[in-house]
Image (tube, rainbow, N blue to C red):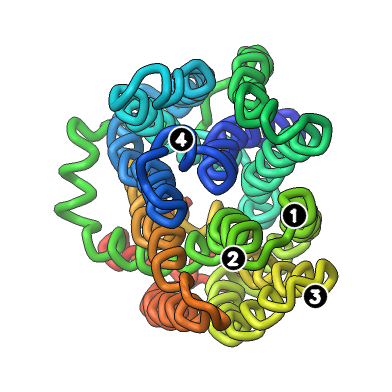
Amino acid sequence: MARLAAASLAGTAVEFYDFFVYGTAAALVLGPLFFPTFSPLAGTLAAFGTFAVGFVSRPLGSVLFGHIGDRHGRRPVLFASLLLTGLATVGVGCVPSYATLGAAAPALLLVLRFLQGLGLGGEWGGAVLLTAEHAPPGRRGLWTSFPQIGPSVGFLLANGVMLALSAGLTEAQFRDWGWRVPFWAAGLLASGGLLLRGSLAETPQFERITERARLPLAEVLRGHWRLVLLTAGALSVGYAVFYAVSTWSLAYGTEQLGVSRTVMLVCVMAAVAVKGAVTPFAAMLGDRYGRRPLCLTGCAASALWMFPMVALLQTAEPLLMFAGFLGAMLAFITMFAVVAAYLPELYEPRVRCTGAAVGYNLAGVLGGALTPLVATAVSGGSGPPWGVAAYLSGIAVLSLGCFALLPETAPACERVREPSEGAAAV
């Protein structure tokens, strides 16, 4: 289990590194480089628009790779998704700017971002099921939390490289070529991840499936459509909170508050580092007390914390901004530490890869794709961006209602259910 968990963590770290490095670049440099004819605000909105495309393509990736995972095994998904995302990320680093290529430059950026999202849409399902279907039931939450640490590691890697380059280069050097280096580095990281995953075995639960779904998506839509919608709505707050902190706040802090790029990156990275460290501990609570109570607690905490977070951000004081980000990240991980165990347990094994991944990635469209766009649009005034806080709190209340309608699945807490009731025996 330790080797499987390490391989899953490494893979999700590399994939999310690829995804996050684009978000950081969108917040800091892509607007003026690829949309120079726009105003600063419009350029940032356009850059976040290309960022959102990655979320739109993630559900399509979950359908494509979910089909492979349910028909041919979880293991092939791990290789194909990592390879696709790595190649697309390296490609982003090679696209000439608008000054060189004209309108074709943002168009290429859009295509590569779409491919990034397509690969990431398959990665999460494959990595999570690899650990979930090997793990003992009483420790499934703990072992599946390791792929959930991967996004924190990927974020820290992406922003650490950006921070080092930003601090070590002049503004002109960073805008000219420095921002491309993290994208080129994705090729080396993806190669290492592929080597690490080379010796992994297929999951025993998949091998025991005697009759595999011919069209997994059709079965999911026919028999589990309500579950997919509820999980998408439930998880949307996690995406919204995370990308409000990790993407929108960078643009807002540097452009509206005049905080240096380095200070903003350090504040956000410190909060994400703490989030990654507490992930397995929150997951162990999920094994002991159930998945659903932690998810409800995280939603409630998110709804209550968004206004204080915006107030602390508005001070432009590093320690206070860090405190605001940290509270948001702790509320976020209270939910997301357990969802890697929760979602697979809700679906029967024959359609689990498709069902869990589609629900997870649809939430990304609802919460992640729109948040930087909406938050940037409503925070252009001179006062504190209370509209952002209201938007995030509203999503938290929506997610709270969806979680309230989902069943408990933790082995220590669950009653025996038929598959038609939503939770599968695992």
Choose between 271 and 388: the one closer to the eye: 388
Report the mark closest to the observer, 4 or 3.
3
Query: Which mark identifies residue 320?
Result: 3
Q: What element does badge 4 sit on?
A: helix
Q: Mark 2 vs mark 4: which is more N-terminal?
A: 4
CA gap between label 3 and label 2 equals: 17 Å
- Measure how far apart labels 2 and 4 are at the Cα level: 31 Å
How far apart, in angstroms, are the residues tagged by discs 3 and 1? 15 Å
Query: Secondary structure under badge 2?
Result: loop
First-in-chain label (4 vs 1): 4
Residue type indicated by callout 3: Leu
Q: Residues within 10 Å of mark 3 (few under 14, many from 20)?
A: some
- Is the C-beta separation of discs 3 and 2 under 8 Å? no
Disc 2 packing (10 Å; few <14; some 14–19; many ≥20): some
Q: Nearer the viewer, mark 2 or mark 4?
A: 2
Question: Which x, y percent locates residue 263?
Answer: 79, 55
Left or right: residue 405 compared with residue 212:
right
Residue at the spot of label 4: 120
Looking at the image, residue 40 lies above or below residue 112:
below
Nearest to the observer: residue 63 or residue 424: 63
Q: Nearer the viewer, mark 4 or mark 1?
A: 1
Q: Quadrant of residue 118?
A: top left
